[in-house]
Image: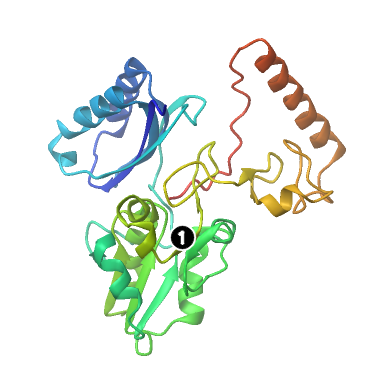
Amino acid sequence: MKDITIISLYKFVSIADTETFRKDLLAECKRLGIKGTFIIAAEGINGTVAGTNENIESVITFLKKDKRFEDIECKYSYDKKIPFYRMKVKIKDELIPIGVDGVDPREIVGTYVNPGEWNELVEDPDVLLIDVRNQYEIEVGSFQGAVNPETDNFRYFPEFVEKNLDPDKNQKVAMFCTGGIRCEKASSYMLSKGFKEVFHLKGGILKYLEDMPKENSLWDGECFVFDNRTSVDHDLENGVHDLCHNCRFPVSPADMESEYFEKGVSCPRCHDSITPERRTSLEERNRQIRLAKERNQSHLGVNQRRKTKIR
């Protein structure tokens, strides 16, 4: 039985006193036993958290009591256990840095497309479909026919646009990302550069998988997620991918069959570059995890996911 509810949410809205908001939100999440991460910035909120269904609904109610968040939308999935080690509420300069000053979805943003209308849009031959996520995410799964910008960080997306796209030639552009937030910034940026018709998937891939029947889906593969599940399938169930604890990239079932894969230590991508010191550290971490399991204890470890936690 899946007793844990996981929600992803964001909203671009002005938050003047970020520190007060951070303290209040953190206190409420801790009171409810919720774990995960919220990012707070002057431009809004972004986060993914998990807990019992009752407590998750309570934190949503807490947010919606603030009129700025009364229409905030959540993407839901479920698991048997909380896929986070702790609860964090961080203050950042931006919710999702794009590497260009002045990009503000509160001022200008692309056209939202609901999951139910998405298939018709992207099957239009005049529409250029772009996956706004990074290369390591796209390797896990993507929409059929989507352009891969081959970026390692969202900050490089403007460079991809400058070098490869033309407002006069690419008159209809549709974009998608995990939860929708990157497309907010990406569409705002592209509109500022003269692109006329810019569409993006409302709620991102997670909402599409939640709403779209599998038999009608254009999604191919799994969706990388920024928590201990690593990936989810079309039913938003735990996927078949693991995460390399050294390079922090997703590991496919084929990678796990490789002689260069060592669970919890390294994978074919980083096998040749891992240092002896790093290997020793990860082997010790695995030993501590094993001992904790034998004692039926929790092992928090070190949450070393890459700093570019973007959705």
Q: Position of residue 140 (x, y in %)?
A: 56, 56
Instruction: Name the one closer to the observer, 116 or 160.
Output: 116
Q: Residue at x 72, y 20 (%)?
A: 290
Q: Amino acid at mark 1?
A: Gly
Please tell me which residue lies in front, 242 or 49.
242
Residue 145: % across, % down: 47, 75
Residue 130 in picture, x, y percent from top left: 43, 71
- Crowd rating for badge 1 (residues with CA inside 10 Å; few <14, some 14–19, many 20+): some
Tally of marks: 1
In percent of width and height, residue 94 lies at 38, 48
Judged left or right of residue 108, residue 190 is right
For the question of whether residue 192 can be seen, the reply is: no
Q: Quadrant of the N terminus?
A: top left
What residue did someone put label 1 on?
99
Q: What residue appears at the point 41 percent right and 51 percent down from the top-left corner? A: 96
74 shown above or below 85: below
> Residue 230 sits in which quadrant?
top right
Tell me what residue is drawn at x 16 percent, y 44 percent: 71
Q: Is residue 41 visible?
A: yes
Label 1: which secondary element: loop
